[in-house]
Image (spheres, helix red, strand yellow):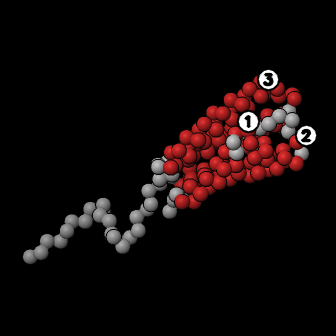
Amino acid sequence: MKEEPIVTGTETNPATPQPQKDTRNTGPGRLLIAVYAVFALSATARAGYQIATKFAEAPLAHILSAFAAVVYIVATISLAKPGRTWFKVSLAAVLTELIGVLVVGAISLFDPVAFPHDTVWSLFGRGYGFVPLVLPILGLLWLNKRRPS
């Protein structure tokens, strides 16, 4: 007499696709997170200094620097966290960063009087080697590659 296997509910059916493991914070994702962390610290320090010492000279530029710092902090944390919700937060943060870099970069290029002091995103991040322009593009490519199922 042939024994039937005991079914415990932990077996996997090869025909059933398994959920993809969230791997945004592994491999090259760790480097991306590290760069975002550096920018979070840098933008926070810059905004803090500008707001504390020169706010009256260019309030819009300094508020945008603080906003950029918040975006980089949110991106850093959300890229490091697993899960669908954190993926959506990452996507929103990186898209916000890209839009900010493009808008502020264009305005600062065509209307330099609007930004008498530089922000992280001025002139498309020229003061930071254009990394603020390239970083969200790389971030979006990485997020697209690591989209949770």
Q: Would residue 144 appear left or right of 68 to someone viewing this image?
A: left
Q: Is residue 105 above or below residue 62?
A: below
**Contact check, label 1 and label 3, Cβ < 8 Å:** no
Q: For mark 3, what is the residue?
A: 53
Tell me which residue sits at (73%, 43%) in the image: 125
Residue 10 in sight here: yes
Tell me which residue sits at (77%, 28%) in the image: 50
Badge 2 amino acid: Val
Badge 3 amino acid: Thr
- Nearest to N terminus: mark 2 or mark 1: 1
Q: Is residue 49 above or below residue 124?
A: above
Q: Residues within 10 Å of mark 2 (few under 14, many from 20)?
A: few
- Nearest to N terminus: mark 1 or mark 3: 3
Q: Would residue 65 appear left or right of 4 to someone viewing this image?
A: right
For the N terminus, the quadrant is: bottom left
Q: For mark 2, what is the residue?
A: 113
Q: CA distance from mark 3 to mark 2?
A: 20 Å
Q: Secondary structure at mark 1?
A: helix
- Image position, residue 32 (x, y; %): 56, 46
Q: CA distance from mark 1 to mark 3?
A: 14 Å
**Contact check, label 2 and label 1, Cβ < 8 Å:** no
- Image position, residue 138 (x, y; %): 61, 53
Tell me which residue sits at (41%, 68%) in the image: 17
Q: Secondary structure at mark 2?
A: helix
Q: Quadrant of residue 132?
A: top right
Q: For mark 1, what is the residue?
A: 66
- Image position, residue 142 (x, y; %): 56, 55
Residue 149 is tagged as none
Tell me which residue sits at (74%, 26%) in the image: 49
Q: CA distance from mark 2 to mark 1?
A: 20 Å
Looking at the image, the residue that sits furthest to the top is: 53
